[in-house]
């Protein structure tokens, strides 16, 4: 009972942070609505959710990677490569069922993630170095397999494009896929032993290894999941924009990391949850969707997003230091 009571302050601070993020989202929404009455219309809200669906899916994998104390800068390139190979497949064989195309792109991403994870887990190479190298390698292979050419909308059957543009019960397929993925990962993170071990490895890698946890296997698995989700995101991206090219999703990894940081996922590992991630994605989506509506210059849009992200990082750092201070105080007491 005493242990539970002592653990509450840090948890309480996390909840306060999420409540503050909700308040910030509401305030921004109200201010933008005053400037442009189109912001809170059902059509614009639907567009906002649709436009952030792929970001939401890929951010799930990045959250797991960040929790382990790692990072993956190759996801934009993985999305481009998976999307390109899938587009080349569907253009050559238009009759292939969309489900198989989704499986193809996801498996391609998982293989690339497995290679990255193997180097990180087996040889203890810094994740930023491995993923940066693979970012260039994968992007180069994307141009090689495509011959520098695009795969355009007329080369893709309507059934494939409906993966992202179609609806079910009036809800866009991208939103439904994102919701399904979040339900799956909510169960995985909160109700499985492996999910809890991911946090243990990120919180204290040395202690986790001493406790007998399969640290290398967990790290490898996290990057496989990251790659699979990036591969899935690449297929959905190509289906949504009906175009596959070598520079698809260029720089997208920065958006994904920014959304995770806004949601309270710690870049130093050990902390993050799906509730905060959802809020971070909503805030990032609002900034991307609303600033053009109020005629903010594209240059100022990037600057404002940067200020918000910087504020989130400072807040996350303060929370971590406060939690560490409380933990130290409990040990002393």
Image: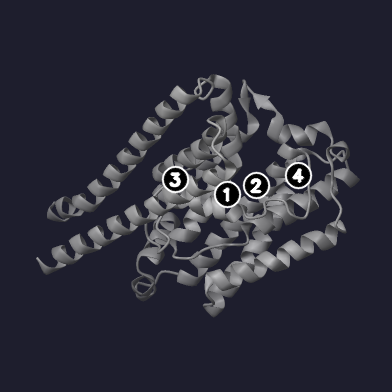
Q: Residue at x 61, y 42 (%)?
A: 54
Q: Determine the residue located farthest toward the left in the rendered image.
A: 333
Q: Residue at x 43, y 61 (%)?
A: 267
> Vertically, is 128 above or below 18?
below
What residue does disc 1 label?
A: 58
Residue 261 placement (x, y as % from top left): 44, 52
The residues tagged by marks 1 and 3 sit, at their Cα atoms, a distance apart of 11 Å
Closest to the observer: 210 or 278?
278
Closest to the observer: 138 or 190?
138
Instruction: Left or right? Give the position of 236 relative to 195.
Output: right
What residue does disc 3 label?
A: 277
> Pointer 3: residues within 10 angstroms few (<14), some, or many (20+)?
many
Q: Secondary structure at mark 4?
A: helix
In primary-sequence order, the first of circles 3 and 2 is: 2
What residue does disc 4 label?
A: 100
The residues tagged by marks 1 and 4 sit, at their Cα atoms, a distance apart of 20 Å
> Toward which corner of the image does residue 237 lie, by quadrant?
top right
């Amino acid at each position: 009972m005493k242990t539970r009571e002592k653990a509450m302050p840090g948890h309480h601070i996390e909840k306060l942070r999420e409540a503050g993020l909700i308040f910030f989202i509401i305030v921004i929404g109200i201010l933008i609505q005053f400037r442009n009455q189109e912001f809170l219309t059902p059509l614009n809200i639907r567009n906002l959710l649709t436009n952030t669906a792929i970001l939401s899916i890929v951010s799930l994998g990045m959250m797991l990677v960040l929790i382990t104390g790692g990072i993956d800068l190759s996801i934009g390139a993985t999305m481009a490569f998976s999307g390109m190979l899938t587009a080349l497949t569907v253009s050559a064989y238009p009759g292939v069922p969309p489900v198989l195309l989704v499986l193809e792109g996801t498996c391609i991403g998982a293989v690339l993630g497995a290679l990255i994870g193997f180097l990180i887990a087996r040889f203890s190479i810094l994740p930023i170095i491995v993923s940066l190298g693979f970012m260039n390698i994968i992007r180069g292979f994307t141009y090689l397999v495509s011959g520098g050419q695009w795969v355009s909308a007329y080369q893709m059957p309507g059934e494939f494009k409906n993966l992202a543009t179609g609806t079910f019960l009036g809800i866009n397929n991208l939103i439904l896929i994102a919701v399904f993925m979040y339900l799956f990962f909510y169960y995985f993170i909160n109700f499985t032993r492996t999910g809890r071990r991911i946090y243990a490895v990120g919180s204290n890698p040395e202690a986790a290894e001493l406790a007998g946890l399969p640290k290398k296997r967990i790290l490898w698995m996290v990057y496989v999941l990251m790659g699979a989700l990036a591969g899935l995101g690449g297929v959905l991206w190509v289906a949504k924009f009906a175009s596959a090219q070598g520079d698809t999703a260029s720089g997208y990894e920065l958006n994904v990391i920014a959304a995770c940081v806004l949601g309270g996922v710690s870049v130093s590992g050990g902390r993050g949850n799906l509730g905060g991630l959802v809020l971070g994605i909503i805030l990032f989506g609002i900034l991307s969707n609303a600033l053009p509506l109020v005629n903010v210059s594209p240059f100022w849009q990037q600057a404002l997003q940067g200020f918000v992200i910087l504020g989130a990082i400072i807040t996350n750092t303060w929370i971590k230091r406060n939690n560490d201070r409380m933990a130290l105080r409990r040990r002393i007491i």
